[in-house]
Image (cartoon, grey):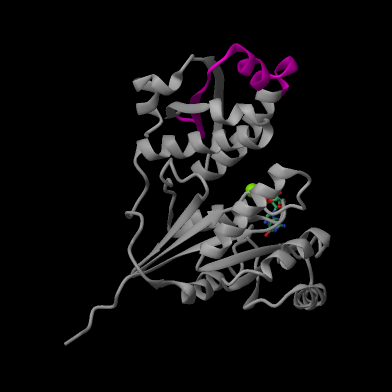
Amino acid sequence: MIQKKSFRSGFITIIGRPNVGKSTLVNRLVDKKVAIVSDKPQTTRHKIMAVVNQKDSQMIFIDTPGLHRPKDALGERLNQVVKSTLAESDAVLFMLDAYAGIGAGDEFIARELAGTKSPVVVALNKIDEIDTERLTKEINLVKGIGKFDHTIPISALKGDGTDELLGFLDRFLVEGPQYFPDGMISDQPEKILIGEFIREKILWMTKEEIPYSVAVSVEEIKARKKKDLIDVRAWIYVERDSQKGILIGSGGEMIKAIGKESRIEIESILGSKIFLDLRVKVRKKWRRDARIIDQLGY
Ligand code: GDP
Ligand code: MG
């Protein structure tokens, strides 16, 4: 009798300082065998970026807000969230930029990673920009900043080493369910996912009072005919005029910044350029508005 191989799955957290190429890697994986799926709107602690489906396995990549040297209480809190995400992962993918070289920011993350029980695999990115001599030097530097399970040189941009990376990460999957169905997500979760991304940007950029009063409702995601462009229309609901003022900012600075950051991320998720129509609306007690609540998928 042939024994059916059981299904394996796992969560892999990607961490690395800004600009090392995390989004590029996710895009690269998306090109291949990936479906983007939404996390449940309630579990905003994790942000699921990409799911790699293979025959008998599923690899779920989670992006983190990033570990920073905390400047204040909020910063500390965010680091705390990242750490618990790391601890719950089946593996951690620590991305480094071989071209820029390894620096203090990387060392800080490496020190934090030393405390995690999850296996840590290093992806040494941007090797397309350097020669072998330099690569050897950077690999040695990686050894100097921490103890990692493996270091894999890659070019997220060109796709070099990314199959090897997936192959290596495969060993950390454990027997478990297929968390997300095959294929692309339906319209509904996609809207929720994008709404959460926008809400997250608001969270990073505003202070105390705002995050709790904000809801983001993605009204429409629509591809423009014969153009490589997707229109995304989203409303940001707040409860008071004063909050609207804060979100728009003087001369519209704040809403522009929120829009810019959101757009970059939504484009990486949708794999297309987008036009983001983002508007702030005041709805007193939106928490009691059934239509808004429905739209939010709660
Ligand atoms: P993130 O901040 O870690 O998500 O980094 P991004 O994915 O946004 O990449 C930052 C910059 O590095 C972008 O300009 C990318 O095009 C570039 N980049 C990412 N991966 C590679 C790579 O493998 N080689 C080269 N040459 N550039 C890369
Ligand atoms: Mg990024």
- Residue at screen point 41% across, 73% down: 174
* Residue 259 location, quadrant: top right
- Residue at screen point 81% across, 64% down: 101
Q: Can residue 224 be seen in this view?
A: no
- Residue at screen point 76% across, 43% down: 72
Q: Is residue 158 visible?
A: yes
Relative vertical location of residue 275 with respect to residue 116 in this rendering, above or below? above
- Residue at screen point 24% across, 78% down: 4
Residue nearest the observer in this picture, 31 or 43? 43
Is the N terminus in the top left, top right, bottom left or bottom right quadrant? bottom left
Q: Does the magenta stretch include residue 226?
A: yes
Relative vertical location of residue 204 with respect to residue 288 in this rendering, above or below? below
Boundaries of the magenta span = 225-253
Residue nearest the observer in this picture, 14 or 227? 14
Residue nearest the observer in this picture, 279 or 146? 146
Residue 230 x/y as whole percent: 49, 31
Residue 138 x/y as whole percent: 79, 72
Relative vertical location of residue 58 with respect to residue 224 in this rendering, above or below? below
Residue 147 x/y as whole percent: 70, 78
